Image (tube, grey):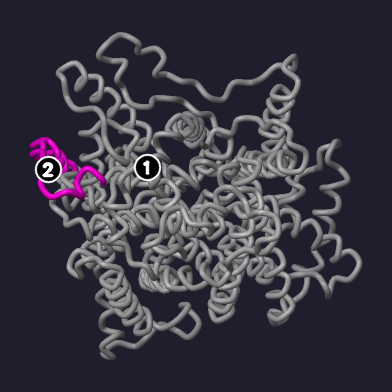
Amino acid sequence: MRCSIGASPSTPNLLWLMALLAEGDAVRATVHPQVRLGRTLLLGLLCSALTSIIVAAAELVAQTIQIGMMQLPPAVIALLFVVVLLNRMVARISPRAALHAPEVAIVFVMMLFSALIASRGVMERLLPVQVGVSYYSEASNWKQLYFPLLNPALVPWDVSAPQPEPLVRWFYQRLPYGESIPWAAWISSTARWLILIGAVYVALLCISVLLRKHWVENERLAFPLVQLPLELMRGGEFFANRMFWLGALVPLFVFTLNGLHRNIPTVPEITLVFHLKDFFKTPPYDQMTMFSAYVSFAAIGFFFLIPTELLFSFWFFYLLSKGLELLGLTYGFETQAKHAAAAGFVKWLGSGAFFAVAGYVIYSARHHLRYVWQVVRGVAPPPPPDSELFSYRWAFWGLIGAFVVIVLWVQWAGMDWWLAALIFGIYLLVQALVMARCTAEGGLLISEGCFTPMDVLTMEKYSLLSPRNLTVMAQLDAMLFRDLRGIPITGFLDAQKLSGEVRLAKRNLLLTLGVGIVAAFVVAFVFQLWLPYTYGALNLYTYVYERQPTQFFRENAPFMTPGAGETPVPAFRPLFFGLGFVITLLLAWGRAAFPSFPFHPLGFAMTATWGVVIMWFSMLIAWLIKVPLLRYGGVPLYRRVRPFFLGMIFGEFFSAAVWAMLALLYGVETPVYPWP
């Protein structure tokens, strides 16, 4: 829902800032001229490069706050605010020189993809995955297990030479004096990886084009992550709204106080993280998986914007899963699960639910997809010009072509073609589709699932796959499948929604995406290759350079020898997978059959995902606020308080960016932010 925001008197302590931001909107008061694309793209490139460097330096060097790994990165919101503020200053001096809303949108989209690519989306995985198996092979038998099966064209080191060779050792231990970074070897292997990543990006972009009209215009999904950037771009009366700044002051005060406490212990602290598992210390309940309550003002703000039944379902099904976990512990059920912060049977319920949600999403769009197919065949008229990034025919055949490239690439890497088709079918049409839906409808900031395609295909009996398939799978799981944070389909959909709101021509958006993504790859590659060779990866963020690139080589090692690791698949895994599938379909039927049905299938499907595990308590708080507010105050009151919750999002994200920069520049201790 998009609501207009009326002007309010400014708060005294922010008078100077609000006067600047709210001063006559010279840009909006005139007819928007054609977008000045050249200079806007140039500014976008500069902001994109700055975003990439700030995100990488903060996450990998300072290692304190992850300001780039969410689907709406805090760093981007902070930089967007700076751009808007500077644009207001320019407008006071020369209104014609100031950026209009569509031009600010171009800069924002380029910064958004720069952050996603620089963080978990691509580069924090692409470089370590090429060398981690080599550096950490000394303490294992990976040289015998994996090196003969690795495709040598996908790594910058010689698989037949003693390891770790200098290229790898210098990456982790820093470059010796007088040596230079081996750019040629890295460019060669990385370029081959980028063929796969480029095909994945094209496939996800095509899917977003095929679904945009149905989600934006037919179903009118909320797209919560777009709301704050949109209001920042519009500026004008929004910046003069007292409720916005009051909401921003709450997290700004709390995180300033908590940051001072980390550096001056005598300053009091406001606790935002509560580890509820500590209350379950009696066996067998001490084996409960992670159970904590995180209070995030930004999360509360985002979830305030989503439908109440989905909000209720998120926290209700999560707490129900913890209750079932306690019951399972009582009767000796398996509670540990790979790749999920939940009990084993809860993971499999969620995995089955993912497939059901994906099927339901496609089924609900069947009429629109039928029209798309008719357009592709040429028996129906296409949409009006500039209503989509490109035609449905290009989107359909682009998806098919990208999928063929993906399968051929993975087969060349060493995997059987049929297995490559299956795992990428699951990735594109289940994992990516559900995460895109969860972000567009549910506003989840963290898009991390609870399974990998290999988990589902083998029911975690990895010995079903050949050693060569397991070797390639270890690389792909680390690169794409395990951690879905930074997946670009959410950015593609948000960008298209945003372009419609600010009337940015789709052809200009397509050019923005192309230029921005290519530039983001180049800047992130250069800077993030320079960082480890300068500082040594051992001195940078451990998760990125040690745990992440080696996790699946460690997990698959027991199954690399024929006959080793042979254990039967526990019956509960396929049973609960099927049960989760059926329950989700019943929930979808209930929503369709009964208008007041309180449960949403998406809330059930996301129970075991990291986003809900971390944010369920913030979801509960948002629900407790929104339900009585709508009941007793209705839509008018919702509209009046909406700026307050947008302000909370801005305040938390802006403070995170500021503290990350302080940690990077001056080495100060930062407050703990409630999104690990």
Question: SS class of the residue under badge 1?
Answer: helix
**Which tag, 2 or 1, sits closer to the chain's start?**
1
Residue at 52% x, 49% y is 70
Residue 222 visible here: no
Q: CA distance from mark 2 to mark 1?
A: 27 Å
| Relative horizontal placement of residue 446, taking residue 473 as reference (left or right) | right
Neighbour tally class for label 1: few under 14, some 14-19, many 20 plus, Cα within 10 Å: many
| Relative horizontal placement of residue 23, taking residue 219 as reference (left or right) | right
- Residue 50, given in percent of the width and then of the height, sits at 70, 60
- Residue 201, given in percent of the width and then of the height, sits at 43, 69
Residue at 24% x, 75% y is 370
- Residue 550, given in percent of the width and then of the height, sits at 39, 47
Specify the label residue 310 is tagged with.
Answer: 1
As displayed, is residue 383 above or below residue 591? below
> What amino acid does circle 2 point to?
Pro
Q: Is residue 542 magenta?
A: no
Specify the label residue 540 is tagged with.
Answer: none
Q: Nearer the viewer, residue 102 or 176?
A: 176
| Relative horizontal placement of residue 18, taking residue 173 as reference (left or right) | right
As displayed, is residue 158 above or below residue 290? below
Q: Which residue has dot 2 on it?
A: 574
Question: SS class of the residue under badge 2?
Answer: helix
- Residue 469, given in percent of the width and then of the height, sits at 22, 59
Residue 509 visible here: yes
Which residue lies most toward the front here? 162
Q: Is residue 579 magenta?
A: yes
Q: Nearer the viewer, residue 461 or 12?
A: 461
> What amino acid does circle 1 point to?
Leu
Residue at 85% x, 36% y is 13
Q: Give, as a single range, the part of the protein colored magenta.
A: 557-580
Which residue lies most toward the bottom here? 378
